[in-house]
Amino acid sequence: MIPLPLARVAEITSGALTGIADARAVVRGPVVIDSRAVEPGSLFVAIKGERADGHDFAARACADGAVAVLASRPVEAPAVIVGDVLAALAALATTVVSELPGATVVGVTGSAGKTTTKDLLARLAARMGPTVAPVGSYNNEIGHPLTVLRADEGTRFLVLELSARNVGHIADLARIAPPRIGVVLNVGTAHLGVFGGKEAIAQAKGELVEALPEDGVAVLNADDPLVAAMAGRTRARVTFFGRSADAEVRAEDVTLDGRGRASFTLRTPSGAAPVRLRLYGAHAVENALAAAAAAYELGLPVGTIGEELSEAEPRSRWRMEVTDRSDGVTVINDAYNANPDSMRAAFDSLAVLGEGRRSFAVIAALRELGEDSVALNEDVGRLAAGAGLEGLIVVGGEDAGPVLVGAPGALHVPDAATAAAELSTRLAPGDVVLVKGPRAAGLERVAEALLGGDDR
């Protein structure tokens, strides 16, 4: 973060300093919402959540080195009192970006693949200069400004992930840190029930390209018609990525190895380079192409892009993490989240990794699908039932009903612990297990239990 006197923080946020706060004290960062992450010079942001209220940890945060607390009510610590903590956090981030004229902001959005693409692009951008990117999926009204506030005078690139739970959310995030390059990956079925249809999802995702300046660049997926159509919604120059022959940045001669990792020729307007991904699943090609197209627009040579993509390992947890146990059992932990599109991609990867082996899967009913929930979850059950599995376990309560209709032979268990215990009695050396479900199901605990104590 750029250093800011506490008086300046109060001015930016339209806040009031409490009597014990020193207006001359300087906030040097980091800005945090977890009191356990406080460092000397921090600003602690007190957010009231469903399970905890940050105001209760204000005194501890300052005792551990925080300069002050950004709060909505008086606390027993130096504080800047504001009417709306999240609005104040956004205002602070907006000011920091405006004082970093040398930094280029790149935004990434889409229904699936945002975090992987962001991770790849951050790696590519780092070859050209200091880069700030979110940790994991810091992509909402809290994580987005917190990421921005990690930038300082030396930052050259801000690679940001933007999510939407409704129309207008991405526009709000884009105002905090106005992007010069906007990447739109796809319009899928994630949060379908919240939005009410794919057209509404496309409307929300397209807010990113609408926010771009005339001298900016919209990087769009040529293979997704709803994304390609966003070219008409931006003042910026448009470039396309994909497998289509018309895409400026495209993948040619795509092949998969026996582990489901893709190799291809990366083709750009100025040449080509070989890419051999270490990421699992054919769907990783789309993410790699999107990152490559944005990096190409930033000025990175195609040869360097190919080299970096070929060396990139997964950065964020529980996204197609493939681990081989010492007994030869392979665990695919893709439990961070799930929607109908990513579920199909995961089973495609399982088909490759499980060829000639006994395959198992642990899944849970998908969420936020609205009036289509029953039909889409039945489809998920049929997808799993038709995957040639040795065993299928469905975790959950009554919500698992539609999945079980689609997969009547599946074993229904109430929780992740029961699923892990059941698998432990059935797995044999050489088997492969896919663990895939919505974040709320907590299925990562199945994978962690299967891998716990292994000497791999």
Image (spheres, grey):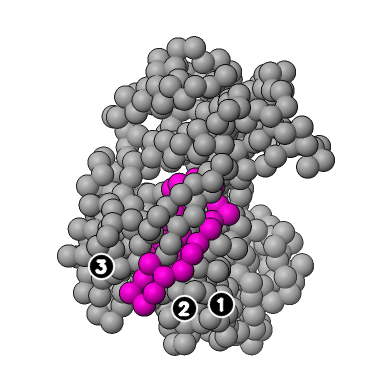
Which residue corresponds to mark 1? 127
The answer to whether mark 1 and mark 2 are in CB contact below 8 A is: yes
User: Of circles 2 and 3, which is in front?
Assistant: 2
Q: Secondary structure at mark 3?
A: helix
- Mark 3 neighbour class, 10 Å CA radius: few under 14, some 14 to 19, many 20 or more: some
Residue 19 seen in this snapshot? no
In this orientation, which residue lies closer to the viewer: 28 or 410? Answer: 410
User: Is residue 322 shown above or below 26?
Assistant: above
In this orientation, which residue lies closer to the viewer: 416 or 238? Answer: 238
Precedes in sequence: disc 1 or disc 2 = 1
| Residue 274 inside the magenta-drawn segment | yes
Q: Which residues are magenta?
A: 267-292
Three-letter amino acid code of the residue under disc 2: Leu
User: Of circles 1 and 3, which is in front?
Assistant: 1
Q: Is residue 369 left or right of residue 385?
A: left
| Quarter location, residue 6 | bottom right
Residue 374 lies, in percent from the top left, at 34, 24
